[in-house]
């Protein structure tokens, strides 16, 4: 919007049909708009989202209003109906009938169950919405009644009519009758006798005209009461705004405000200032000063007439409806100007200096002292309010900047004597976009020519500098002799002494900079983002970025910390820590501006300039910062004393790589087990597995114990899960031939043929293998084994069973060697391990009750190992749980697992408990078996401990933590997070086509390096900013290399162009669709590249549409010439390259001539000639034109109007003309007819039609809410 004098602060804007009615919700950030096409829209202006639509009216809806307390809204339209809606139930409750012509306005009463309405039937009607009947009909106007309104306090109604009068009605009599002592009565009841015509006209003796205001020369369109004073304002077709005053006996005209050049549509009082706001069909909104009776501001639109105004009674919000939508705006900023002085000396208390009621005041949070310091004069004009303050404590100087005169500043000297605060001291003024102190006696000004002027306290220029960027539009304080300069989307650290930039960081639309106490960390606040930055000597290091969907208002650093930043949005206090984590501290009833954080208190200012103190709970971010700083004693203190618990904090600790800390919270054994396994805490995992007795848990424990080399716990886990094969192999690896022999006997009892054979093979027991082969009727293999092992007697015994033709084949080949298991050289309780000192949280969780638990690790050997005698299958000598195994006597037990395997092992009634491996007696092992250390190689006391360095955060994890760009999450391997983000941003629901894209991006961001011979390959993350990337412990500067870039997409599109030119349409479709889908994973680092990416996206969409149209035309409509020509015509309106457009025009022209639609063919020929084609094509087009000029007619009627702009629905293949409703794909913005909403897009094949997301993000500096397509406003409803 352009303005003749200034621009107001637009908070929200919509594009729609003409808006005729507006109403703010009294409590929620909602506004309801009634449109000329019969639709009522409910918007959340804070979030910028459409909440609901109500569409039962037939024809324009001119009036709409929210109820003050109930979830109701009322509307009135040209269908003569008043409808009352419940927006919670999302439906119309009932309809009030009675008006005989268009209804202009409707309004709820603030106390009574009344609705007032005005109509073109020249009446005002009062309705009881609880009884659902008409209370009274107010007659007297003799032309259309354009508006009606209740008085905010008194029993009065004001109405405006085209009969050139404004009438004030007294309804106190109606109040006594309808809501008085005996309760409400139906208006048709009159002493028991119904009144004639009462059903139609209601009672007419309960309201009377109190004042008749005459003075306008033409019809009056609007009249409004003042919220607190006895004033009325009216606007009329005579282009005048009149102010009226009234008392108990009369009302009279006070003044006339002239300035509009067309009919005044609506006029209202500002709820909090002495202002009148009016709008007009002259496409302007004007603001008038009530005391000066003169216009102070004018805002204009180039194309749209204004029709209606809305005023929020609690906040300084206004709304205006015009021909193409509505806007919600403020006249000026409500943020109070303030600055915080931390105090130069150690004993000095922090002070907040702020402006309120034309006074500079000082508030001390520590003592709650609030005193005025000096009186200031406000500059004339609408933008005279101070915008920012800067304080110089050494010289008691104050710089106050405002937007007056396009940007100006004032320099004040604050008196030491507070008693002189009422005096207005002299100030030194100057013009400039911004001014800040840069030294004890110097300040810098950015003048309107974009030069930096350094001035002394006498306001004299001492130095003139050019900023680092010529388009610098704002400067911020950055320490002595330093400035932060903002230019477009860059923030540059500029040294005034050296006259050169020291560092730069990208951040768009920065409004405020908040420095930490160390002057090395600062936060950049923009409209929808918070960026945390650290300043080094020669560089600015990006730490974290938090994106918000609603406006960021203010922020402060946590007291004494550079890890946590606290900020406010419109309705929340939130925190962000430098590692990128953020969360909510508390909610807000109204916006506040943070000044100081001290302990659990936040000191702030509200919009009226009042100081406030908020109590907050900082436990969550204090816990997270302590965790990041590895202050584990603080972490434990918070765990014990706070109520910080739940799945969210456990999930956070797991995600950040602190499962050992999460163990301190958890009581559930299953969760404890999973956390213990994740952090490698075998002791806790063993305790939980023993308590759970779950097969899956024992399996996981065995895998983790095997990874750590604790084979004794591996053995126990395999015993618990009855994993015989793994247990046998474990005994082979550990050289435990004694237990391998027992496993052989167990396999024999279980009837496990392969188990017997494998165990015999592991033991080198050739006779047992031959026995197994003979039992399984494999004489040839048994004969071969006997011969190979030199068992001649067995071979001779088996030889007769082997056919003669096979005997020669069974002889061992020359040079054959026998296969024997390796001989165990080293046997120990556990494999030798690297002794690692435990972390702070490792080992079992020690509580106060565990006072007898020693702090030292258990180093001794474990006697007998795990499961020593309980697997002894000797001659009945060993017992398991007191059972006699007696294998040789045939008393075979129940095998592994006790009684449940009796049947399998063939044990009889006399069998003992058998091989009950599950009931191992672990009493003698103590805690030693669980220690991951074991004896090792014997040696190495405490002095031999080796503490390896703490593993840093992997590059992929840092990418996940620091980015909200889908492409970067894909490169990090976090596919699920990327898919979730793509679904929220642009409605992607079909991820199958994206699999090759995801795999390409992920593999392209990793590389493998060879190390020493025999060593594993080293995985290395690839960075796209490798030239500027410097390794650090945080590693936050590294950006993943993403193979899908603008140049790569350009090559894909060129390949698609070639296929399209050659007529290989399926091949072209594949290439363009892949390029379009690849945009979802693309990453760019500048606004220019982002614009190119959006352009490439549009190219792919247009060419896919063209290919689909042409393919459909050829395959489905080759026998339908009319439809064939229609699709050919639609194809010519795709945005293609000139060569391809020429091809489509030739095809359409030829098809139209064959159909004898000569007028259409002539149109195609003329468009073809405009492209300056080759000679032969030009000659053909001229011939067609000549034929068409001779036969100016169309044989068939087509659904094609080239003069009316349209887009083509690629589902129905029908045109959607401008102004018709449509839905668009949430990703590629392809147009579709409304019935296709919710279906899969046929263009991109991945996103949902009609999805309203936050918009695809391809860059870290990109705003989260964006307009993906450039032409959406032209066609959308």
Image (cartoon, helix red, strand yellow):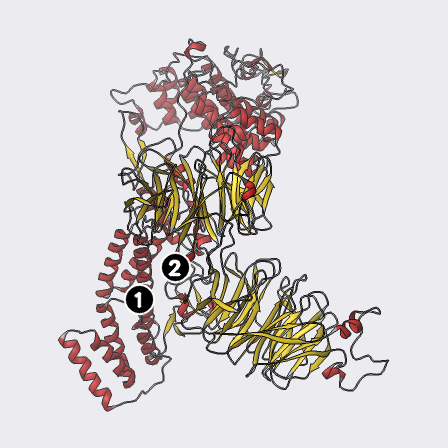
104 over 435 or under it: above or below: below
Residue 611 percent across, percent down from the top left: 58, 45
State how many labels appear: 2
Q: Identify residue for label 1.
A: 1107
Determine whether 170 is above or below 1024 in the image: below
Q: Is residue 917 left or right of residue 788?
A: right
Q: Point out the frontmost of discs 2 and 1.
A: 2
Report, in whole angstroms, how far the alpha carbon at label 2 lies from the one at label 1. Answer: 22 Å
Query: Is residue 282 shown above or below 950?
Result: below
Q: Which x, y percent locates residue 351?
A: 52, 38
Residue 658 seen by the camera: no
Rendered image quadrant of residue 518: top left
Pick whichever, 216 or 591, lies toward us. 216
Task: Indicate the position of residue 126 as horizontal and vertical percent values.
Answer: 70, 75
Nearest the viewer among 1019 and 496 is: 496
Asked if residue 515 can be seen in this view, the reply is yes
Left or right? Give the position of 494 relative to 362.
left
Left or right: residue 261 versus residue 1153 is: right
Residue 1268, which numbered label? 2
What is the x, y in percent for residue 527? 45, 51
- In the image, 236 versus 313, the foreground residue is 236
Q: Residue furthest bottom?
A: 1190
| Mark 2 and mark 1 residues within 8 Å of each other at the beta carbon | no
Residue 897 higher or lower than 971, as above or below:
above
Mark 2 residue crowding within 10 angstroms, few (<14) / some (14–19) / many (20+)? some
| Position of the N terminus by quadrant | bottom left
Question: Which element is circle 1 on?
Answer: helix
């Amino acid at each position: 919007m352009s303005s003749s004098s200034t621009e107001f602060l637009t908070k929200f804007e919509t594009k729609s049909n003409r808006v005729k009615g507006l109403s703010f919700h009294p409590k929620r950030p909602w506004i309801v708009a009634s449109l000329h096409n019969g639709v009522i829209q409910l918007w959340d202006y804070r979030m910028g989202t459409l909440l609901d639509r109500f569409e039962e009216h037939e024809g324009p809806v001119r009036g709409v209003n929210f109820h003050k307390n109930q979830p109701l809204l009322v509307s009135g339209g040209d269908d003569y109906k008043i409808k009352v809606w419940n927006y919670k139930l999302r439906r119309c409750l009932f309809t009030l009938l009675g008006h005989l012509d268009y209804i202009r306005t409707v309004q709820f009463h603030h106390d009574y169950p009344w609705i007032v309405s005005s109509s073109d039937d020249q009446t005002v009607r009062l309705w009881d919405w609880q009884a659902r009947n008409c209370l009274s009909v107010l007659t007297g106007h003799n032309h259309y009644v354009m508006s009606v309104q209740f008085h905010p306090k008194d029993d009065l109604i004001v109405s405006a009519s085209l009969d050139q009068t404004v009438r004030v009605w007294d309804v106190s009599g109606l109040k006594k009758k309808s809501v008085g002592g005996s309760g409400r009565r139906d208006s048709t009841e009159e002493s028991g006798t119904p009144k004639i015509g009462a059903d139609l006209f209601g009672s007419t003796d309960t309201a009377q005209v109190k004042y008749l205001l005459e003075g306008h020369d033409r019809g009056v369109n609007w009249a409004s009461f003042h919220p607190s004073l006895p004033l009325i304002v009216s606007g009329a077709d005579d282009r005048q705004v009149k102010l009226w005053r009234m008392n108990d006996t009369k009302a009279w005209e006070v003044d006339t405000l002239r300035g509009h050049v067309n009919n005044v549509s609506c006029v209202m009082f500002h709820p909090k200032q002495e202002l009148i706001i009016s709008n007009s069909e002259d496409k302007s909104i004007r603001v008038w000063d009530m005391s000066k009776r003169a216009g102070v501001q004018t805002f204009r639109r180039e194309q749209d007439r204004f029709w209606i105004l809305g005023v929020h009674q609690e906040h300084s919000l206004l709304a205006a409806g015009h021909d193409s939508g509505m806007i919600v705006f403020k006249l000026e900023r409500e943020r109070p100007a303030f600055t915080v002085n931390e105090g130069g000396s150690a004993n000095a208390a922090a002070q907040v200096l702020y402006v309120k009621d034309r006074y500079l005041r000082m508030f001390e949070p520590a003592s709650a002292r609030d005193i005025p310091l000096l009186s200031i004069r406000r500059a004339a004009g609408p933008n005279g309010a101070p915008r920012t303050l800067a304080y110089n404590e050494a010289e008691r100087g104050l710089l106050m900047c405002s937007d007056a005169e396009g940007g100006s500043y004032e320099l004040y000297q604050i008196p030491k004597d507070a008693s002189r605060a009422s005096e207005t001291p002299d100030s030194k003024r100057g013009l400039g976009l911004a001014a800040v102190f840069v030294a004890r006696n110097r300040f810098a000004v950015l003048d309107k020519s974009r030069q930096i002027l350094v001035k002394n306290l006498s306001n004299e220029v001492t130095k003139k500098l050019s900023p680092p960027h010529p388009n610098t539009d704002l400067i911020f304080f950055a320490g002595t002799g330093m400035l932060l300069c903002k230019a477009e989307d860059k923030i540059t650290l500029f040294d005034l002494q050296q006259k050169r930039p020291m560092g730069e960081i990208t951040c768009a639309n920065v409004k405020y900079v908040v420095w930490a106490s160390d002057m090395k960390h600062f936060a950049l606040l923009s409209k929808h983002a918070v960026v945390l930055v650290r300043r080094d000597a020669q560089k600015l290091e990006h730490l974290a970025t938090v994106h918000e969907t609603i406006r960021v208002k203010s922020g402060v650093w946590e007291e004494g910390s550079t890890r946590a930043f606290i900020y406010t949005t419109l309705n929340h206090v939130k925190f962000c820590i430098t590692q990128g984590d953020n969360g909510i501290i508390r909610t807000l009833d109204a916006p506040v501006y943070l000044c100081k954080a001290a302990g659990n208190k936040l000191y702030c200012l509200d919009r009226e300039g009042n100081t406030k103190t908020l109590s907050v709970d900082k436990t969550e971010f204090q816990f997270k910062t302590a965790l990041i700083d590895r202050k584990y004693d603080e972490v434990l203190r918070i765990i014990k004393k706070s109520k910080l618990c739940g799945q969210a904090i456990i999930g956070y600790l797991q995600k950040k790589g602190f499962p050992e800390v999460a163990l301190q919270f958890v009581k559930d054994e299953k969760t404890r087990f999973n956390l213990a396994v994740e952090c490698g805490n075998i002791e806790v995992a063993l305790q939980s597995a023993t308590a759970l007795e779950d097969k899956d848990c024992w399996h996981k424990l065995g895998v983790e114990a095997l990874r750590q080399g604790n084979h004794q716990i591996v053995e126990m886990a395999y015993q618990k899960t009855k994993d015989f094969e793994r247990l046998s192999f474990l005994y082979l690896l550990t050289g435990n031939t004694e237990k391998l022999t027992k496993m052989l006997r167990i396999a024999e009892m279980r009837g496990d043929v392969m188990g017997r054979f494998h165990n015999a093979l592991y033991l080198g027991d050739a006779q047992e293998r031959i026995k197994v082969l003979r039992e399984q009727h494999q004489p040839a293999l048994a004969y071969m084994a006997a011969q190979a092992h030199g068992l001649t007697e067995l071979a001779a015994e088996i030889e007769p069973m082997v056919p003669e033709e096979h005997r020669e084949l069974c002889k061992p080949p020359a040079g054959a060697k026998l296969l024997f298991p390796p001989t165990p050289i080293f046997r120990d309780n556990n494999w030798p391990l690297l002794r690692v000192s435990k972390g702070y949280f490792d080992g079992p969780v020690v509580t106060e009750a565990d006072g007898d638990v020693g702090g030292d690790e258990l180093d001794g050997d474990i006697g007998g190992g795990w499961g020593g005698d309980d697997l002894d299958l000797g001659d009945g000598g060993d017992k398991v749980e007191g059972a006699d195994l007696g294998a040789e006597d045939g008393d075979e037990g129940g095998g592994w697992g006790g009684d449940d395997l009796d049947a399998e092992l063939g044990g009889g009634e006399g069998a003992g408990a058998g091989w009950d491996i599950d009931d191992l007696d672990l009493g003698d092992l103590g805690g030693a078996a669980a220690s991951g250390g074991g004896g090792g190689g014997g040696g190495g006391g405490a002095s031999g401990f080796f503490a390896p360095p703490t593993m840093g955060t992997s590059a992929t994890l840092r990418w996940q933590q620091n980015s909200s760009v889908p492409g970067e999450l894909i490169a990090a391997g976090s596919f699920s997070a990327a898919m979730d983000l793509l679904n929220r941003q642009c409605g992607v629901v079909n991820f199958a086509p994206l699999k090759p894209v995801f795999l390409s991006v992920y593999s392209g961001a990793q590389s493998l390096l060879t190390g020493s011979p025999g060593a594993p390959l080293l995985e290395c993350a690839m960075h796209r900013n490798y030239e500027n990337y410097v390794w650090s412990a945080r590693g936050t500067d590294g950006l993943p290399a993403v193979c899908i870039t603008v140049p790569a997409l350009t090559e894909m599109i060129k390949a698609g162009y070639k296929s399209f030119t050659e007529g290989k349409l399926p091949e072209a479709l594949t290439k363009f669709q892949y390029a379009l889908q690849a945009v979802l994973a693309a990453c760019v680092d500048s606004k220019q590249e982002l614009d190119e990416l959006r352009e490439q996206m549009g190219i792919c969409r247009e060419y896919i549409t063209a290919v689909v149209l042409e393919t459909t035309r050829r395959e489905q409509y080759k026998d339908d010439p009319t439809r064939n020509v229609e699709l050919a015509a639609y194809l010519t309106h795709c945005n293609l390259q000139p060569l391809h457009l020429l091809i489509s025009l030739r095809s359409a022209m030829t098809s139209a001539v064959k159909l004898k639609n000569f007028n259409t063919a002539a149109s195609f020929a003329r468009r073809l000639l405009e492209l300056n084609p080759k000679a032969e094509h030009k000659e053909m087009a001229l011939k067609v034109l000549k034929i068409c000029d001779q036969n100016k007619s169309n044989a068939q009627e087509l659904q094609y109007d080239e003069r009316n702009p349209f887009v083509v629905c690629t589902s129905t293949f029908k045109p959607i003309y401008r102004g018709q409703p449509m839905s668009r794909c949430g990703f590629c913005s392809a147009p579709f007819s409304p019935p296709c909403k919710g279906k899969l897009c046929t263009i991109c094949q991945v996103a949902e039609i009609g999805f309203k997301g936050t918009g695809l993000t391809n860059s870290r500096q990109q705003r989260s809410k964006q307009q993906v397509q450039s032409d959406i406003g032209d066609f959308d409803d």
